[in-house]
Image (tube, rainbow, N blue to C red):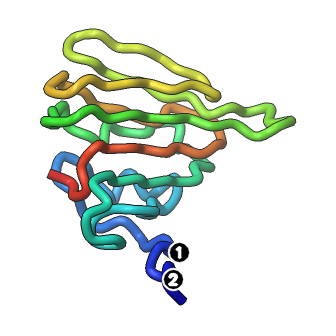
Amino acid sequence: MKYEDCVLKPRPSEEIQHHDSSVMNKTGQSYVLLDDIHYDGAGIRVTTRHIDNVPEDMPDYVELHTHGVDQVFIFLDEPGNTNPLQAEITLEDEKYTVTAPVTVFIPKEVPHSQRVIRGTGRMVTILKKGKYP
């Protein structure tokens, strides 16, 4: 078939710079949906993680860092969910507590980090670059 290489299965996310996967994955495995490894020349990296059972004392697991391209965090909820996903987003020296459903746009070169605080939902990350730094 002509376009079969365009139909992609997710793969578990590899260790990435600035992120402590051993802590992050306690709330759910992260998967890469699309990047330059999946499809050469994709020029975008999309990941997702279903988040559940967030520990009460969830430590920080992402260092403050920057990217040379824009990034988007999307936090999704499910109908009827009584425990929506909440996260703490740091942009430079400002902290925001967000509740799903919500989208956070991170302009390139803005120092940022994120930490899930509580709840259940899905996080989608879009990096406008085909490979993580």
Of residues 54 and 101, the one nearer the viewer is 101
Residue position marked by numbered label 1 in the rendering:
7
Distance, label 1 to label 2, CA atoms, is: 6 Å
Image location of residue 89, percent across then percent down: 38, 24
Q: Which mark is residue 4?
A: 2
Q: In which quarter of the image is residue 132?
A: bottom left
Q: Position of residue 94 (x, y in %)?
A: 29, 10
Q: Tell me what residue is drawn at x 56 percent, y 28 percent.
A: 86
Who's the residue at 73% across and 33% down the image? 83
Residue type highlighted by circle 2: Glu
Contact flag, marks 1 and 2 (Cβ < 8 Å): yes
Residue 75: x, y in percent? 56, 35
Work out whether 105 lies above or below 54. above
The mark total stands at: 2
Asked which quadrant contains residue 128, the reply is: top left
Which residue is depicted at the point 41% across and 53% down?
46
- In the visual, does 129 lie left or right of 88? left
Q: Which residue lies furthest to the top in this view?
A: 94
54 displayed left or right of 115: right
